[in-house]
């Protein structure tokens, strides 16, 4: 199963509509198709910013369910690898979780490319990877078409 760390911007962007990449990733966590990890500090920040920036009560409830599914990690080392120092905590969580992907729209994180075994990808890149990995994407359609 794919292990991910999710940046707050994805949670906020997901509120725009049901087909938004962020919303699709949240649904994948809720459905148990992927595993999301975060430190307690990051989860607290996510909750605070979500309630500050999102007014859709139904979506906020979905996020509360999402937060219950996140697996908590305790970063064991402090990192200084991201230009925007605030983003280091996400990379620390990814390292602690041995995450496959850190999903973000933040260019400071995306510029890293990888850190250890974790690949930094934007939400649309991740959805394409996830759909191929769990057999829901373009590859499935091609397989069905060729039958």
Image: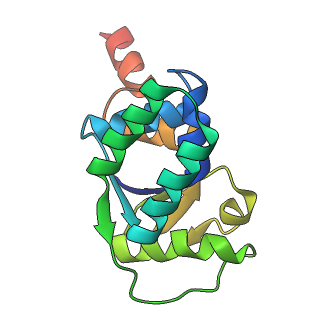
Give me the residue at 43% from left, 76% from top.
Answer: 95
Q: Nearer the viewer, residue 76 or 127?
A: 76
Q: What is the basis of the colouring in this image?
A: rainbow
- Indicate the position of residue 46 as horizontal and vertical percent values: 51, 55
- Indicate the position of residue 29 as horizontal and vertical percent values: 33, 42
Q: Is residue 20 left or right of residue 36?
A: right
Snapshot quadrant of residue 97: bottom left
Q: Residue furthest bottom?
A: 77
Q: Is residue 101 above or below residue 17?
A: below
Give me the residue at 59% from left, 36% from top.
Answer: 54
Q: Is residue 94 above or below residue 101?
A: below
Snapshot quadrant of residue 75: bottom left
- On the rendered image, what quadrant is the C terminus found in? top left
Give me the residue at 73% from left, 65% from top.
Answer: 108
Q: Would residue 134 be visible to someone looking at this image?
A: yes
Q: Would residue 1 be visible to someone looking at this image?
A: no
Q: Nearer the viewer, residue 147 or 30?
A: 30
- Indicate the position of residue 104 as horizontal and vertical percent values: 60, 52
Give me the residue at 47% from left, 58% from top.
Answer: 101
Snapshot quadrant of residue 81: bottom right
- Indicate the position of residue 3 as horizontal and vertical percent values: 34, 57
Q: Is residue 114 above or below residue 32?
A: below
Please count the marks in the image: 0
């Amino acid at each position: 199963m794919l292990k991910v760390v999710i940046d707050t911007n994805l949670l906020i962007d997901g509120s725009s509509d049901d087909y938004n990449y962020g919303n699709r990733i949240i649904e994948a966590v809720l459905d148990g198709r992927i595993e999301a990890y975060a430190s307690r500090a990051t989860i607290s920040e996510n909750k605070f910013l979500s309630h500050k920036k999102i007014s859709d009560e139904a979506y906020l409830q979905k996020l509360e369910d999402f937060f219950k599914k996140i697996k908590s990690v305790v970063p064991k080392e402090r990192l200084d690898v991201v230009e925007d120092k605030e983003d280091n905590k996400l990379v620390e969580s990814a390292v602690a979780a041995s995450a496959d992907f850190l999903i973000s729209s933040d260019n400071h994180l995306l510029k890293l490319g990888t850190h250890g075994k974790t690949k930094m990808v934007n939400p649309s890149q991740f959805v394409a990877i996830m759909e191929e990995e769990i057999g829901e994407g373009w590859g499935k359609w091609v397989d069905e078409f060729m039958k």
